[in-house]
Amino acid sequence: MAEYNLKQYLKKLGVSKVGFADVGGIANNFSDLPNGISLVLKIPKKTIGYIIDENYEQYWRSVHQIMDELTKISFKGEEYIKILGYNALALTMNRNECDMKKLLSILPYKTIATKSGLGWIGRSALFVTSQYGSAVVLGAILTDMPLEFDKPVTDSMCNECVNCQDACPVDAINSTKWNNKLNRNDIIDIKACSEYVIDLYKKGLGCSKCMSECKFTLDYLNR
């Protein structure tokens, strides 16, 4: 009942999807908090429209506001769990030491999300949900609170779709379909991707074509 109430509380705060996962042993930095709570917040259709219009200044401003919103929700979730008498840690980007050059963190949010059964990894190496495509922002809370884990997703639902691969301006995406046995480097040239994205970001621009052209993202936009 406590975990049901926790999910309902987080959804009431505004998250789009919530899932629970066993993340024990994945990151030594957080070994005392083996249970993961994955938080998914959809990116509004209007924000995705900024990419299509190539209005990247407004896009990044909007995305950062969404990320800030999810961070606030994470802290409220941490506080809620602590009131119940358990340890908890809102896994913010600062606490997760996200390496922007490698686009990598200590405990990837995507790993928690797939283990929580909320979606899969696309050919683009972005997290994909059936409801919103890859138009989502991810967050997480770690805890020692007992949770009933959701069923992990271990395979991709992208099937034959290669929209993201075709849209990539630097050919960083190959045709390999993700499963949970693969590493990120098996499906994407992260060096080519990160160098291109970071260079654009410094200029106040952006790419995100793999997100906006994702079949599931397009389905979300057209609903």
Image (tube, helix red, strand yellow):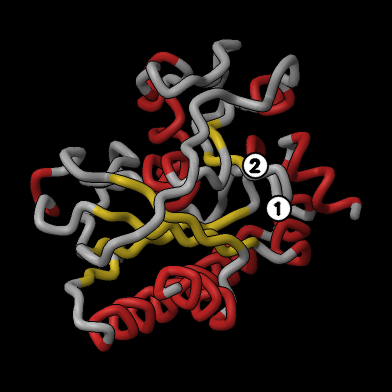
Residues at discs 1 and 2 in contact (Cβ within 8 Å) = yes
The residue closer to the viewer here, 121 or 141, is 141
Q: Quadrant of residue 177?
A: top right
Q: Tell me the amino acid under the disc marked 2.
A: Met
**What distance separates the C-alpha of mark 1 from that of mark 2?**
9 Å
Residue with the most extreme bottom position: 83
| Badge nearest the viewer, 1 or 2 | 2
Residue 56 in picture, x, y percent from top left: 63, 58
Classed neighbour count for the residue bearing mark 2: other residues with Cα under 10 Å, few (<14), some (14–19), many (≥20): many
Q: Quadrant of the N terminus?
A: bottom left
The residue sitting at 64% across, 68% down in the picture is: 58
Q: Is residue 90 left or right of residue 173?
A: left
Q: In the displayed structure, would residue 38 be above or below residue 176?
A: below
Q: Is residue 131 left or right of residue 188?
A: right
Q: Earlier in the sequence, mark 1 or mark 2?
A: 1
Residue 64 in picture, x, y percent from top left: 49, 69
Q: Quadrant of the C terminus?
A: bottom right
The residue closer to the viewer here, 19 or 183, is 19
Does dot 1 land on a helix, a strand or a loop?
Answer: helix
Q: Tell me the amino acid under the disc marked 1.
A: Ile
Q: Which residue is mark 2?
A: 211
The residue sitting at 65% across, 62% down in the picture is: 43
Q: Which residue is mark 1?
A: 51
The residue closer to the viewer here, 174 or 106, is 106
Q: In the displayed structure, would residue 150 be above or below residue 163?
A: below
Classed neighbour count for the residue bearing mark 1: other residues with Cα under 10 Å, few (<14), some (14–19), many (≥20): many
Residue 156 in picture, x, y percent from top left: 59, 25
The residue closer to the viewer here, 110 or 97, is 110
Residue with the most extreme front position: 1
Does dot 2 land on a helix, a strand or a loop?
Answer: helix
